[in-house]
Amino acid sequence: MKKIKVILAEDEAALGQIIKESLETRDFEVIHCLDGEEALEKFTSGKPDILVLDVMMPLKDGFSLATEIRNLDEQIPIIFLTSKSQTADVVKGFSIGGNDYLKKPFSMEELIVRIHAQLRKNNQKKETSKLGKYDFDYKKQLLTFEEEEIHLTHREAELLYHLMLHKNEILERSEILNKLWGTDDFFTTRSMDVFISKLRKKLKKDTTIQIINVRGFGYKLIF
Amino acid sequence: MKKIKVILAEDEAALGQIIKESLETRDFEVIHCLDGEEALEKFTSGKPDILVLDVMMPLKDGFSLATEIRNLDEQIPIIFLTSKSQTADVVKGFSIGGNDYLKKPFSMEELIVRIHAQLRKNNQKKETSKLGKYDFDYKKQLLTFEEEEIHLTHREAELLYHLMLHKNEILERSEILNKLWGTDDFFTTRSMDVFISKLRKKLKKDTTIQIINVRGFGYKLIF
DNA sequence: GATTTGAGTTAACAAACGTTAACGAGTGTT
DNA sequence: AACACTCGTTAACGTTTGTTAACTCAAATC
């Protein structure tokens, strides 16, 4: 399993180090930055999963930093750390697009729980993915096209999901057959073709989407 | 006040003894087991409040033990002790349903804090849990939707409870049938379907909640 | 250009699931 | 004891889903 990557911006070196180490023992990957500028740079280069930002920092404070980052990424969860406990600040933090707020001093448990909470929320949010003009909700097995809902069966949803994982590249028959059916004999192969056919029908409303066959190899979902 | 009952599984007798004594001075009741088999037996007979399991043990390692215990009791907190610090192990521990992880060497303070943390969490665990716009009170067999109370029968509540334990993932028919009915023959299967039907009806007020069937496998509760 | 092979589509079928209603065991009430 | 009530199971029937089969079409090979 991939480690969760955290960017931690905390100017007090000692405190930052403690947080970093605690998180690392809990199996996070932590990039510790000592000021806002550094954090911004590491954000663009590092592709973190979550940001933990001290509010009061030299060069660029947590709020300014968060504002800039929100312009670059609307999704990434941001948790603020602060020693000031004023209401005004909390409000400011949320209005900027922060997702949570932790008052110093806090326990490591608390921070970890909140990080997990944010990531969980974020994962659940991204349930649907764009498929041309459609929205595809894998869990709900639902395609949405301009208010219209098209229900997918379990197999259809699974197949489409795998095609989307490999969008614009060839997905081999045997790979998908083994993953979804567990075997790739003659009949299963024919069965898969039937499902491809069904998916094409359900995806007809956006003509830019196509499931192209690559004879002898498999299928390619393009859009 | 009742003492907190801990089952400690630790094959190093000396270390186990130290932990046992330290916990006892802190007013815990400790049952020290030297291997996994013994711990499993003491678990079934002893009704402990929490389990502290060494990962590496003779006869039955901590992970296997935890897996078996989780099948018997989905609630009880499990803390693993380990000398290995590999990532894979931590992940495995949590995926099995472990609640915390302590790397050797650790201080007694640390262990005690974590035990209290787990027990607190377990106690605070609200009676009712959120299910979309509903509140579900398992013990009272009650669904609440905007002041309106919908009564559930025992079986309905049990079924819903298990579905919620596996929310957003497929819950296999046989698993639920064996847990709730004790068998998974044809008639029990049909019976379960009837209850699914009843639950769907009672969950209709929040359309984001769905019990989706996965043909040949089981059901998936999504929301 | 004929032949072979893989893929597309449709229809038929079987199995799994959904729903309703009837039944009966258990419980409490009069 | 007779009655009403609730709950879980069984039965029956309708619907959905996945597989198989048959036929058609298109691509590759010779």
Image (cartoon, coloured by chain):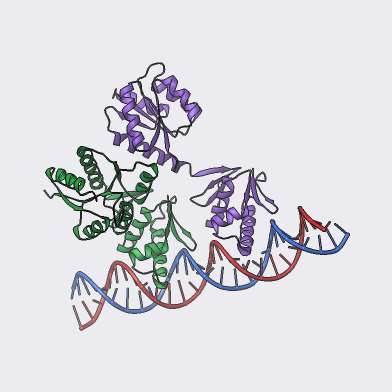
Chain colours: A purple, B green, C blue, D red
Whether residue A170 is situated above or below residue B196 in the rendered picture:
above
Along the line of sight, the residue nearer the viewer: B104 or A99? B104
Along the line of sight, the residue nearer the viewer: B12 or B138? B12
Q: Residue furthest top?
A: A59
Q: Quadrant of residue B155?
A: bottom left
Q: Please indicate whether residue A74 sits to the left or right of residue A87 in the image.
A: right
Residue A205 visible? The answer is no
Q: Please indicate whether residue A175 sits to the left or right of residue B40 in the image.
A: right
Residue A140 drawn at (x, y percent): 49, 51
Whether residue A217 is situated above or below residue A38 in the rendered picture:
below
Q: Quadrant of residue D16?
A: bottom right
Q: Quadrant of residue A130?
A: top right
Residue B149 drawn at (x, y percent): 31, 54
Along the line of sight, the residue nearer the viewer: B152 or B39? B39
Q: Residue at x 27, y 48 (%)?
A: B54
Along the line of sight, the residue nearer the viewer: B44 or A152? B44
Residue B71 drawn at (x, y percent): 32, 58
Residue A20 visible? The answer is yes
Q: Please indicate whether residue D25 sits to the left or right of residue C10 in the image.
A: right
Q: Residue at x 40, y 64 (%)?
A: B174
